Image (tube, helix red, strand yellow):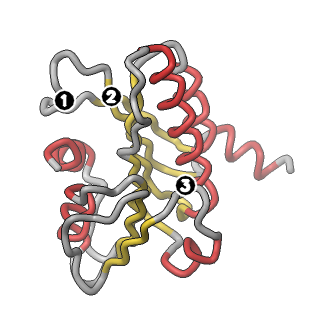
Amino acid sequence: MFKLEEIDKRCRLLKPGQHVLDLGAAPGSWSMFAAKAIGKSGHLLAIDLVPLTISLGATAAAIVGDAFDVGAEVFSEHGPFDVVLSDMAPATSGTRDADQARSFDLVLRALEVARVHGKEGSSFVAKIFMGPDYEVARKHLREVYAEVRTLRPESVRTNSFEIFFVATGKGQSKSAQKTRRNP
């Protein structure tokens, strides 16, 4: 939770009344923080392969399943989303390059969910393992979002190679605007 709390403190992403999607939500601390931040007028959808270990309250829904296999109707029922969060990480193999490549794939898949189900102007937060695909991932985010920042919260272990993308202004990037003008 401390990582998301620091990201939110620095970027001010979560506000009362928002609809938030938390991909890779277990054990549930990010969902708990987000649910509190958006309050009773907001709505949270949390998805993970394993059940959450906490209760999120009446304005939240938790789904056990693969975030990339749930039907579009689930996202439509709970969205569109003001913020899409992804703290997903691959099952690590111990091989840094392989783990980073899997992390990159998760970021791109989460980005596609955010691209389709995020509101115009929405935000996106995703964990990625730093490696050779970092710049490629950042390029993909810049095609969708007006601003893309990279943060390393203080609560990340010193020897960890995880960092977080924080992207804001969905649909307001120069390339997104160009696509809308020239379909």
Q: CA distance from mark 2 to mark 3?
A: 19 Å
The residue indicated by pointer 3 is 114
The residue indicated by pointer 2 is 163
**With 46 as the anchor, is 68 left or right in this view?**
right
Going by the numbered disc 2, the residue's amino acid type is Ile
Q: CA distance from mark 1 to mark 2?
A: 8 Å
Looking at the image, is 26 positioned above or below residue 128? Answer: below
- Rate crowding at label 1 as few (under 14), some (14 to 19) or many (20 or more) other CA atoms within 10 Å: few
**Most foreground residue, 73 or 83:** 73
Callout 2–callout 3 Cβ contact below 8 Å: no
The residue indicated by pointer 1 is 156
Q: Earlier in the sequence, mark 1 or mark 2?
A: 1
Q: Residue furthest front?
A: 93
Q: CA distance from mark 1 to mark 3?
A: 24 Å
Callout 1–callout 2 Cβ contact below 8 Å: yes
Query: Whole-percent x and y of residue 119?
Result: 54, 64
Provide the secondary structure element on which disc 3 rests: helix
**With 113 as the anchor, is 127 left or right in this view?**
left
Going by the numbered disc 3, the residue's amino acid type is Ala
**Of labels 1 and 3, the one closer to you:** 1
- Rate crowding at label 3 as few (under 14), some (14 to 19) or many (20 or more) other CA atoms within 10 Å: many
Looking at the image, is 158 positioned above or below residue 119? Answer: above
Residue found 42% across the figure and 15% down from its top = 96
Provide the secondary structure element on which disc 1 rests: loop
Query: Whole-percent x and y of residue 31?
Result: 27, 62
Callout 1–callout 3 Cβ contact below 8 Å: no
Q: Residue furthest right?
A: 183
Please give the label number shown on residue 51: none
